[in-house]
Image: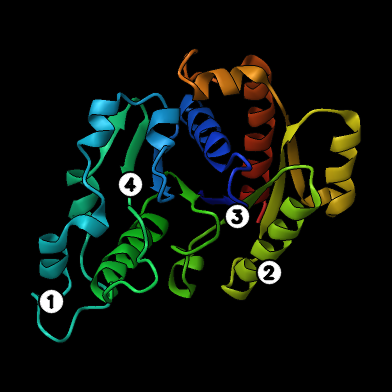
Amino acid sequence: MKIAVSGKGGVGKTTISAGLARYFAEQGFRVYAVDADPDTSLGMVLGIPQELTEGIKPIVDMREVIAEKSGGGGAFFTLNPDVDDLLEQYSVSHGNIVFFKMGAVKQGGSSCYCRENSVLNALVNSLLLKKEEVVILDMGAGIEHLTRGTAGGVDIMIVVTEPSRVSVQTARVVERLAHDLGVNRVRFVGNKVRSEREENFIYDSFPREQVLGIVHFDDAVLDAAMGTEPQEAPEQIQKSIAVIGQRIKREVNNN
């Protein structure tokens, strides 16, 4: 299964991504957890020691490796370089979870990152099209790393939303962009829901059959974010994530 997780900034994409990674790992799957968010916090939320995640160099920063993989530094570059070995060399294992970070996309006004993006796309293609395990892409606040070429390998995109008009509007924009890229199965998860009224707001904002589940707000998540508690999700959130994971498996396997 190949799962992309997206949504508006701050809605809890990384919390949901990490929860799904843990759930599938506990189910016996080999999980490739890809931090495609420039904030690169997925490893921390997964509970991987910081000294290990800091030792992983983002692919976009590997200029020499990128030059070698994409054609040696000349005026031309390979659009589909062989990057399978990068999966082993530039990742860290944590139980059944294999984690690596892709790094940030280029910023406005910066030099051309054609070579970097070439390797990034090839790397995502390798994960999305060649691995038979579970792949979870924790996207940035959008779908920058998902191109038309890689979209064909995504089984499902999960758009995380809070119970607010702005967040719901962003979720719909992401849904439309995903469909434009060829991702046919887009589903929604309501996060940080505090009341029955907010839960109903989520269900009223999308077709009910497209909402995989609701994750309720818990102060323990904030404690974990501040480093005052372990990164392990509260039991109620784990149960909600398990329901979402079961529905993902059912939807993908029934296709």
Horizontal placement of 66 versus 223: left or right?
left
Q: Earlier in the sequence, mark 1 or mark 4?
A: 1
Tell me how far mark 3 sits from mark 2, CA to CA.
Answer: 12 Å
Judging depth in this view, the residue of 1 and 192 nearest the camera is: 192
Which residue shows up at 41% across the image and 41% down it? Answer: 33
Horizontal placement of 61 versus 247: left or right?
left
The reply to whether the C-beta atoms of the residues labelled 1 and 3 are less than 8 Å apart is no
Q: Nearer the viewer, mark 1 or mark 4?
A: 4
Quarter residue 122 falls in: bottom left
Does residue 14 sit above or below 169 in this rendering?
above
Q: Name the kind of residue labelled 3 in the image.
A: Met
User: Dot 3 lies on which element?
Assistant: strand
The label shown at residue 71 is 1
The label shown at residue 176 is 2
How would you rate the neighbour count of disc 2 (Cα within 10 Å): few for under 14, some for 14-19, many for 20 or more? some
Which residue shows up at 85% across the image and 28% down it? Answer: 195
Q: Name the kind of residue labelled 2 in the image.
A: Arg
How would you rate the neighbour count of disc 1 (Cα within 10 Å): few for under 14, some for 14-19, many for 20 or more? some
Does residue 67 sit above or below 124 in this rendering?
below
Q: Earlier in the sequence, mark 3 or mark 2?
A: 3
Q: Earlier in the sequence, mark 1 or mark 3?
A: 1
